[in-house]
Image (tube, helix red, strand yellow):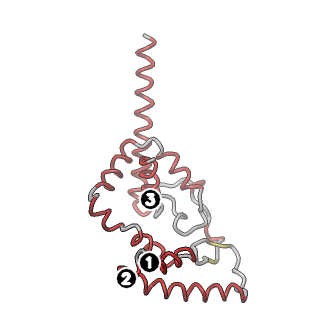
Amino acid sequence: TPRKHDIDMKKDIETLIAEERADIILKYATGRQGGVEIDPWEDADYSIYKVIDRFGFMHEDELPAPTAHEEKLKQLEIERAEKWLKMVKKWDKYKNSDRMVKRVYKGIPLQLRGRAWALMLDVEKTKKENEGKYEKMKEQARLYSSEIKQIDLDINRTFRNHIMFMDRFGVNLALSEVTINLQRKL
């Protein structure tokens, strides 16, 4: 009957999607070093890049020498990082203080940004309160997320000239897991 045919076809499509999702996840879990075959069109030629900037982006040509203004900004960033380091070491004294708020508005140095946000958001407390939840969300995403193929396509075409994303099925796995879990929360 036509209705049974439609149901069978829908099951076949769902099975194909589930198989494709499992295949993509396996490739990220295994990685290039584990023997995942990568199509030539997916594997960019990085031999043309000669310089990596401080943000991890690769460039074909040498970067110009910093200007006096850039050197001044760099020195300011070093001073700001030293202040933040002192503040992070004595977090209980500075959390929720006017000084901390002012420094956030001025900018958190790159080197301390992850640590500062973790302290401001009290990540350790949240992790303890939700122990095992992240792993459970990752497993659910691996099994049921309908967005894995799109996330994989996006990862492959985004920032391919950045050292974190240059290897197909490499370090960017962490980003895909975060993206999948965020997609599930929204």
Amino acid type of the residue that numbered disc 1 sits on in the rendered structure: Ser
Residue matched to label 3: 173
Q: Earlier in the sequence, mark 3 or mark 1?
A: 1
Q: Position of residue 106 (x, y in %)?
A: 57, 77
| Total numbered badges shown on the rendered structure | 3
Q: Local crowd at mark 3 within 10 Å, few (<14), some, or many (≥20)? A: many
Residue located farthest toward the front when viewing the structure as drawn = 98
Residue matched to label 1: 97
Q: Earlier in the sequence, mark 2 or mark 3?
A: 2
Would you place residue 48 above or below residue 28 in this image?
below
Would you place residue 10 above or below residue 130 in this image?
above
Query: Residue at horizontal 30%, vertical 51%?
Result: 136
Q: Which mark is residue 93?
A: 2
Q: Secondary structure at mark 1?
A: loop
Q: Residues under labels 2 and 3: Cα distance?
A: 37 Å
Q: Which mark is residue 144?
A: none
Amino acid type of the residue that numbered disc 3 sits on in the rendered structure: Leu
Would you place residue 22 above or below residue 75 in this image?
above
